[in-house]
Image: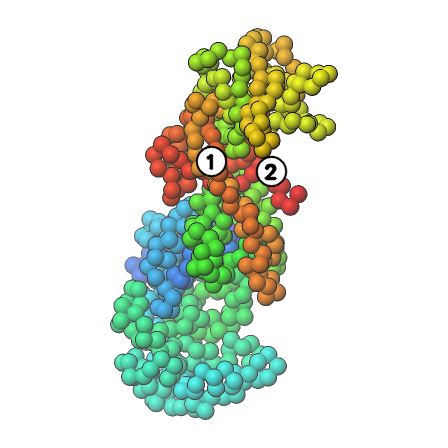
Amino acid sequence: MSNDSKNNNPTVPNGHGTPAPAPSNFLRTIIEADMTAGVYAERKDNQGQPLPQVITRFPPEPNGYLHIGHAKSIWVNFGLARDYAGRCNLRFDDTNPEKEEQEYVDTIIDSVKWLGFDWKDTSGDHLYFASNYFDQLYQMAEYLITAGLAYVDSQSAEDMAANRGNFGEVGKDSPFRGRSPEESLDLFRRMKAGEFKDGAHIVRAKIDMASPNMNLRDPAIYRIRHAHHHRTGDKWCIYPMYDYTHPISDALENISHSICTLEFQDHRPFYDWVLEKLSDGGFLAKPVPRQYEFSRLNITYVVTSKRKLRQLVDEGIVDGWDDPRMSTLVGIRRRGYTPEAIQLFCERTGVTKSDGWIDMSSLEGALREDLDPKAPRATAVLRPLKLIIDNFPDGHIVACHAPVYPPAHPEHATALRHFPISKNVWIEREDFMETPVKGYFRLTPPTADKPGSRVRLRHGYVVECTGFDKDADGNVTAVHCNYFEDSKSGTEGSANYKVKGNIHWISVAHALEAEVRLYDRLFSDPHPDAGGKDFKLALNPHSKEVITAYLEPGLATAMPDDRYQFERHGYFVVDRVDAVAGKPVFNRTVTLKDSWGK
């Protein structure tokens, strides 16, 4: 792709594998203007090779599992780099050793790959860790202290908070703000040597305690933490702060456009201050990165707070981080969502600077649109009731067949699934009604003045209801019918039978018994944690139901992550954790249509 923005024509997937023109947004406008002006055109890497004009990054902290909100940031950063012939780095901002673990690093890497993105290109593997830069970050902090741009503060945390002021009151200078660079540098080196306890001292940038932007009131850049780091071990007992580390990491990695969500907008002046001072000091090459913010993804009926997600796990409200009801990427992956559906959803929500809420139905709609043309079809009976075809010969079996794929699928013309019909079949309990309501066209028993109703057993025969059995409690235990031998679907005689009802069925003798988990939204309130509400009060008591269902026999070979449309019921996926060979466990991904709250 040409670097001349006039010739740029980036494309994005439209959900069916066909490229479609990428919709314009303010980030694309900025990038194209920078490319036209050649802002980053002359940069070279350490080997003297030209760098792409567009280098972005996705910089998660490895302190938890990624959630659906992160998917938008991943899509934005990797997608822009892809569309403008650039690259996107994956960088872990691992500066807080008390909360970070290798487990989170591994799952984040796996989730980004699952979404369809990669950080490797012809120039190498662009996976980085902020901890790679600890030595450089320390040297730069020493420079800031020496240059009088930072100092060691020895106030207590309480005094520091009180002196910081608030939005209506300017801050007060620390009594240690006037420390000489020599004294601060000595203290900083002793901090590094481990002489002091946690909280005894902190390094702060010297900016402006009267600034209306709270982030410029002498922000902290280093603190003491005697904690084991998952990558650097016990080498360090001081760790850089995120707001100090982040811009430096961007600059060291030659990021051009540092794209983040709107909550970092007020942090941008400090981002620029750090890069300005360190590039003037000769530590960082110019032009330095620029930060831009877009609105985060807010979806109804979910929570994305890491603390609240952890609470759901720790209190056993859900079955782990990958519970299919969770908003984590491992959860929605196990639920059966596809990377293509998530990318389609991100594309449709767009990139703006205005915060707002996207209804969950939009995400579910993108999933249905992605799955509908490609998910193999299958028959499943979820609430079984036995139907006995009294005039069907005992032991007699007739082969039936149906298309595997929907008409839009390239293999639909030839791919067939085969299943037998026998004397006893399972039907859905709702397909029989002893006393039918108006407009009910499924199985109903005969009355004194008319015969029982006729329906077609889908892909099989037309049957006529002749009666039913009940147990001592009055529950219907079986329905009886007769079939018409010349009515089989696909035969000449089938045209002689006109019926309004068409129902699903599975041969009792051949059915695959399987565990099916019917998942729904975890919360019944569209904004479960808004306004300080207790989000647990909004839990949906019907968010998970485990049933034993009967499936067509061919599904015995289904493998983990295989997705199907259970005709009439919705889209289902073979559970990637609990399924074993020959005994698949199915999770409901989404219903066939949006019926939430109706």
Residue at the spot of label 2: 593
Relative to 302, is 291 above or below? below
Which quadrant would residue 40 be assigned to in this image? Answer: bottom left
Q: Residue at x 48, y 73 (%)?
A: 270
* Residue located farthest toward the front when viewing the structure as drawn: 472
Residue 278: give x, y in percent of width and height.
40, 74
The percent position of residue 499, horizontal first and vertical second, equals 65, 18
| CA distance for labels 1 and 2 | 23 Å
- Residue drawn at the location 38% of the way across and 39% of the way down: 579
Along the horizontal axis of the image, is 597 left or right of 79? right
Nearer the viewer's eye, disc 1 or disc 2? 1
In this picture, is 100 found above or below 545? Answer: below
Q: Amino acid at mark 1?
A: Thr
Please give the residue where the numbered disc 1 appears in the rendered image: 548
Coordinates of residue 374 in the picture (x, y in percent): 49, 32
In the image, 313 versus 338, the foreground residue is: 313
Residues 391 and 448: in front is: 448
Residue 150 shows up from this direction: yes
Identify the element where label 1 is drawn: strand
Say what amino acid the circle numbered 2 marks. Lys
> Does residue 50 show up?
no
Report which quarter residue 488 is drawn in. Answer: top right
